[in-house]
Image (cartoon, rainbow, N blue to C red):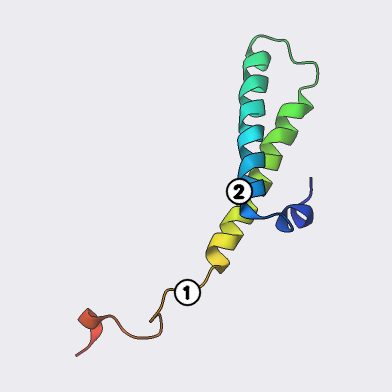
């Protein structure tokens, strides 16, 4: 999963995939503690995918529209 691919998704898709990956991460951590994981790299990959998804969501949050009146000073700032 690449960041460019994720950026094409809408927020609903991203949050759904994020939920799936968090559940998978929980299962893998549990299996890892019981020494049942066949491929330990899978846990690392899931963690990085979660980080990519959260990064794209945060980028969208920061790039969102500014609140109305952002250029006007607040009433307490006027002299």
Residue at 65% x, 33% y: name it: 20
Q: Position of residue 58 (x, y in %)?
A: 57, 56
Left or right for 69, reference 13: left
Could you say whether the residue bearing mark 1 is in a helix, strand or loop? loop
Q: Earlier in the sequence, mark 1 or mark 2?
A: 2
Residue at 19% x, 90% y: name it: 79
Residue 66 disc label: 1
| Quadrant including the N terminus | top right
Residue extending furthest bottom?
79
Residue 10 in the image: above or below residue 33: below
Left or right for 49, reference 12: right
Q: Position of residue 2 (x, y in %)?
A: 79, 50
**36 and 4: which one is in front?**
4
* Quarter of image, res 74: bottom left
* Quarter of image, res 30: top right
How crowded is the residue under tag 2: few (<14 C-alpha within 10 Å), some, or many (20+)?
some
Q: Position of residue 10 (x, y in %)?
A: 66, 55
Cα–Cα gap, marks 1 and 2: 21 Å
Q: Nearer the viewer, mark 1 or mark 2?
A: 1
Left or right for 48, reference 65: right
* Quarter of image, res 77: bottom left
Marks 1 and 2: CB-CB under 8 Å? no
Q: Position of residue 41 (x, y in %)?
A: 78, 28
Residue 53 in the image: above or below residue 41: below
Residue at 54% x, 64% y: name it: 62
Residue at 71% x, 54% y: name it: 9
Q: Which residue is mark 2?
A: 54
How crowded is the residue under tag 1: few (<14 C-alpha within 10 Å), some, or many (20+)?
few
Could you say whether the residue bearing mark 2 is in a helix, strand or loop? helix
């Amino acid at each position: 999963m690449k960041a460019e691919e994720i950026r094409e998704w809408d927020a609903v898709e991203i949050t759904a995939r994020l939920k799936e990956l968090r559940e998978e991460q929980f299962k893998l951590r549990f299996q890892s503690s019981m020494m049942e994981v066949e491929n330990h790299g899978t846990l690392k990959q899931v963690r990085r995918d979660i980080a990519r998804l959260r990064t794209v969501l945060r980028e969208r949050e920061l790039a969102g529209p500014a609140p109305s009146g952002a250029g006007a000073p607040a009433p307490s700032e006027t002299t």
